[in-house]
Structures are given as structure tokens and as C-alpha cells.
Image: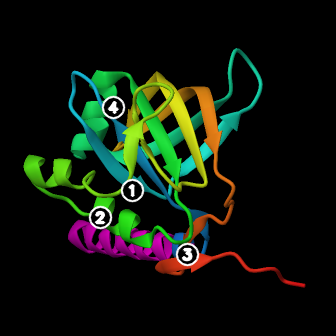
């Protein structure tokens, strides 16, 4: 009987995971590439889990969730700084390039030919991004499989083109007026 219960609990947990993933796929969110450079190396990763924490306090703060096995997460923790580049709707190829896993040399090649330059905090900033948030690492918490990384924002660069790339329903999207 206990094997049956363990089996049904496992099926129930798998169903919960599947339903969670389906439910979250229905939430459209903006896409960012979080980059870092310094003693821990130059790296970056595409994230859709970037959000503001607060505009108040000592300085504005934002958070990003990055898988604990991502070399970018390890580099951010060592470099203690990052830039969150909010992608323009025309930068889907950049999102794809930084979303894939790869060897160290392949990861470094991601920055070639994309208009990267050191931003206000020295971290890689993408030309044409709708916004670039330059952050000092404030804290990081490992929660199960992901680091919750909180950055204290030291500068924000805004482009003249505010149309952000979105991700929802398992595909890239753009915002349209409903009127």
C-alpha cells in the first residue's frame, strides 16, 4: 500500500509541475540578458524572471532568478556586479544566443558582433536595449535550483525605442495596443 501512495504522490507532483509550467507559460513577461564581467569572467544569460524589488530605500533594486548551474550565475556572484539589458522587440536573436548553454569559448563568442560596450558600472551593455540597469550585487539566495540575485541599481540607461521584447505562451511576442 505504501508503494501505491508513493507512486500516486509522485504522479501528483509531476502533474503539479506540468500544470505549474503550463500556467506560467501563459504569463507574458519581458526578456532581458543579464551580463557580467570581472575576475569571475565575462558571461551572460537570457532571463524572463527579472523584476523590480523597490524604487525606494538607499537605491532602487531589482532581482533576477538564474539557474544555479549557469556559468553566468557563478560569474555574477564572483564579480559582484551585473547589467540587466532589457531587450528591444527586434533583439530576439540576442535572446536566443544567450539562452543556449555552451562551452566557455562559445559563451564568450556570444558577445561578438552585437554592439556590446562597458556600461556605467563596467558591465557589458547591449546597444539598442530598451533599458540597461547597472547593478551592484546586494545579496543572493540559493532557492532549490535557482539563485535569487538582488542588485542595487546604480544607473539606468534608456533608449529612445521603448518597445520591449516579450515572452509568453512559449514564444516571443510584442506588445500591441488594445484600443
Q: Main secondary structure of the magenta part?
A: helix
Foreground mark, 3 or 2, reads 2
Is residue 139 placed above or below 171 in the rendered structure? Answer: above
- CA separation, marks 4 and 1? 14 Å
Whichever of callouts 2 and 1 sits on the residue coming sooner in the sequence is 1
**Looking at the image, is mark 4 or mark 3 earlier in the sequence?**
4
Tags 4 and 3 touching, CB below 8 Å: no
Residue identified by numbered label 2: 97
Q: Which residues are magenta?
A: 1-23
Q: Nearer the viewer, mark 4 or mark 3?
A: 4
Q: Earlier in the sequence, mark 3 or mark 1?
A: 1
SS at mark 3? strand
- Asked if the residue at tag 2 contacts the one at tag 3, i.e. Cβ–Cβ closer than 8 Å, the answer is no
Q: Residue at x 49, y 43 (%)?
A: 84
Q: What label does residue 76 carry, if any? A: 4
Query: Which residue shows up at 27% across the image and 23% down it?
Result: 78
Mark 4 vs 2: CB contact within 8 A: no
At x 68%, y 20%, the residue is 59
Residue 13 magenta-drawn?
Answer: yes
2 or 1: mark nearer the eye: 2
- Give the alpha-carbon distance from disc 4 to disc 3, as whole Å: 26 Å
Out of 10 and 89, give the one closest to the viewer: 89
Which residue was labeled with disc 1?
46
Tell me which residue sits at (50%, 77%) in the image: 172
At label 1, counting other C-alpha atoms closer than 10 Å, the crowd grade (few under 14, some 14-19, many 20 or more) is: many
Lower position in the chain sequence, tag 4 or tag 1: 1
Amino acid at each position: 500500500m505504501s508503494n501505491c501512495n508513493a507512486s500516486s504522490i509522485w504522479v501528483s507532483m509531476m502533474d503539479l509541475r506540468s500544470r505549474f509550467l503550463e500556467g506560467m507559460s501563459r504569463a507574458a513577461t519581458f526578456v532581458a540578458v543579464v551580463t557580467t564581467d570581472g575576475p569571475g569572467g565575462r558571461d551572460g544569460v537570457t532571463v524572463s524572471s527579472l523584476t523590480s524589488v523597490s524604487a525606494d530605500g538607499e537605491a532602487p533594486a531589482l532581482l533576477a532568478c538564474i539557474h544555479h548551474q549557469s556559468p553566468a550565475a557563478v560569474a555574477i556572484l564572483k564579480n559582484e556586479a551585473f547589467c540587466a539589458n532589457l531587450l528591444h522587440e527586434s533583439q530576439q536573436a540576442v535572446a536566443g544566443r544567450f539562452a543556449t548553454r555552451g562551452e566557455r569559448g562559445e559563451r564568450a563568442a556570444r558577445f561578438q558582433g552585437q554592439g556590446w560596450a562597458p556600461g556605467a558600472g563596467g558591465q557589458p551593455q547591449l546597444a539598442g536595449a530598451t533599458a540597461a540597469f547597472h547593478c551592484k550585487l546586494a545579496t543572493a539566495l540559493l532557492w532549490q535550483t535557482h539563485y535569487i540575485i538582488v542588485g542595487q541599481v546604480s544607473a539606468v540607461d534608456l533608449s529612445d525605442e521603448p518597445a520591449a521584447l516579450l515572452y509568453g505562451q512559449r514564444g516571443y511576442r510584442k506588445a500591441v495596443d488594445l484600443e
